[in-house]
Image: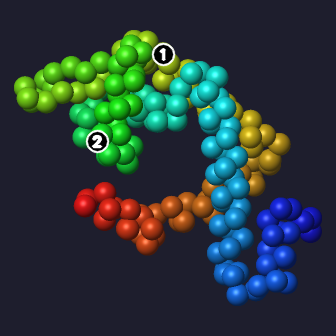
Amino acid sequence: MTTDRVGELIAAWQQELPSVLHPTTELTKRVMLLAGDLNEVTRRVLRELGLTTAEFDVLGSLRRSGAPCRMKPTDLSRSLLLSSGGTSNVVNQLVNRGLVVREPDPDDGRGTQIRLTAKGIEVAEQAVLATSAAHDEMWAGLPADALQAATEALRPLLTENRPAARARRTEIRS
């Protein structure tokens, strides 16, 4: 068995302070390293496109919503797990760049909706394609069965029944 960074870390703690190790420690460290790598790759690609991760998230949510790529601000905030103020700041930046517009809500004359412009759709699709390709490249060389096994193993860990997910839902409702 080959030793990697996580294996070395676990071995060091096993020798120095074994009580800090739990059955979840190795998985946690591996997921944290992978998340860091994915985050770094994503940020690099977005920087090349002149986008922040928050802008990418807004553009992606709007594009993913389907034609006409429009959402109510509260629904957009909820989909991003952002405060309404945070979402509004990002939307303002995107309006200034001509990527989204605020328009009257056709179902509620008092409300507004945020809609991608044609340029916004183009940038959103370019960003999604570029980040997807970069993520795929990150996993290049791994056997397809290993990728499938990892995906299947992680699926139950991301259910909404986890204590952290339940706590997050409670915070959002507050």
The residue shown at (76%, 86%) is 18
The quarter in which the N terminus is drawn is bottom right
| Spot occupied by residue 145 in the image (x, y as percentages of width and height) | 74, 53
Q: Name the quadrant containing residue 44.
A: top right
The quarter in which the C terminus is drawn is bottom left
Secondary structure beneath label 2: helix
- The residue to which callout 2 is attached is 84
Of circles 2 and 1, the one toward us is: 2
The residue shown at (59%, 21%) is 49
Q: Name the quadrant containing residue 161.
A: bottom left
The residue type indicated by label 1 comes to Glu
Q: As drawn, which residue projects farthest toward the left?
A: 109
The residue shown at (74%, 36%) is 137
Q: Is residue 13 left or right of residue 44?
A: right
Kindly indicate whether the residue at mark 1 contacts the one at mark 2 (C-beta within 8 angstroms).
Answer: no
Question: Is disc 2 surrounded by few (<14), some (14 to 19) or many (20+) residues within 10 Å?
Answer: some
Q: Nearer the viewer, residue 156 or 173?
A: 173
The residue type indicated by label 2 comes to Ser
Q: Nearer the viewer, residue 119 or 48?
A: 48
- The residue to which callout 1 is attached is 122
The residue shown at (8%, 29%) is 110
> Does residue 109 sit above or below 74 in this rendering?
above
Snapshot colouring: rainbow
